[in-house]
Amino acid sequence: NAGVTQTPKFRVLKTGQSMTLLCAQDMNHEYMYWYRQDPGMGLRLIHYSVGEGTTAKGEVPDGYNVSRLKKQNFLLGLESAAPSQTSVYFCASSHRVEQPQHFGDGTRLSIL
Amino acid sequence: AQSVSQHNHHVILSEAASLELGCNYSYGGTVNLFWYVQYPGQHLQLLLKYFSGDPLVKGIKGFEAEFIKSKFSFNLRKPSVQWSDTAEYFCAVNLNTGFQKLVFGTGTRLLVSP
């Protein structure tokens, strides 16, 4: 079972470049989430989606955009990357909001 | 605002020692509680969860946690740790009403020496 798959696993960008992180889940989950993980700060929610075609802001949404055109995919975009966005990004999904979330393996993103 | 505190940022233990990691949350309503573990280089995995019922919950790999409502706590315990328990442990809480985001603690990094 693939579960939650994130691509790419690693990426280095220059300041001002744009990129899209892809998250795909094969569990037919309604809810999907994007987090960033920074040392000493745990995981912070960037954006989330409660179903196909819906998105909402989380705790730290600035500088990011998301789309959920298909139920199984949740894309995270950086329009103009900044060094402050250097982080490890995790995607997660869950069947219902109160159910445990299933996490992907993460994307390590460095912005120079 | 809802918050989760993990007071132990780094814990170092020898194999066979007992473990207790603290977790406190700030919300007084009905909550769902989770402990996740992140092994080096891996993604987060669920250790155990509490929704309702018996406040002492047992998870995978010999871990357990006790929900003490009066103390707003959900501490993680293991009687005898192993080298393979070296990982980062995250407590997480969400409210049991409507859509409430999962709030994570800052994590506790556990190092178990053989």
Image (tube, helix red, strand yellow):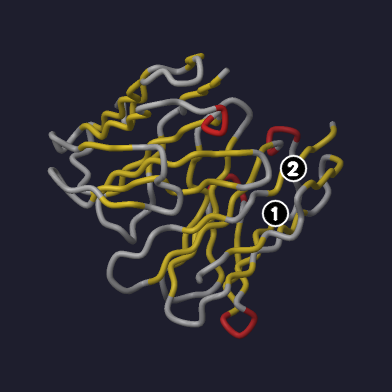
Quadrant, the C terminus of chain B: top right
Q: Nearer the viewer, residue A48 or B83?
A: A48
Marks 1 and 2 share the same chain: yes
Q: Residue at (44%, 35%) from the top-left corner?
A: A90
Local crowd size for mark 1, using a 10 Å CA cut-off: few (<14), some (14–19), many (≥20): some
Name the spot of residue A3 as percent of width and height, x first: 31, 31
Give the mark toward the camera: 1 or 2: 2
Classify residue B7 as left or right of residue A55. Answer: right
Chain under disc 1? B
Q: Earlier in the sequence, mark 1 or mark 2?
A: 1
Which residue, given by chain and number where applicable, does mark 1 sit on? Answer: B78
Name the spot of residue A69 as percent of width and height, x first: 13, 35
Looking at the image, the residue that sits furthest to the bottom is: B70
Local crowd size for mark 2, using a 10 Å CA cut-off: few (<14), some (14–19), many (≥20): many
What is the three-letter code of the residue carrying label 2? Leu
Name the spot of residue B15 as percent of width and height, x first: 82, 40
Q: Nearer the viewer, residue A91 or A45?
A: A45
**With respect to residue A55, does B55 lie above or below?**
below
Q: Residue at (53%, 64%) from the top-left corner?
A: B57
Classify residue B1 as left or right of residue B76. Answer: left
Chain under disc 2? B
Q: Residue at (28%, 70%) from the top-left corner?
A: B98
Instruction: Estimate the spatial distance between the alpha carbons at disc 1 and disc 2, rounded to whole Å.
Output: 12 Å
Q: Residue B110: which numbered mark, if any?
A: 2
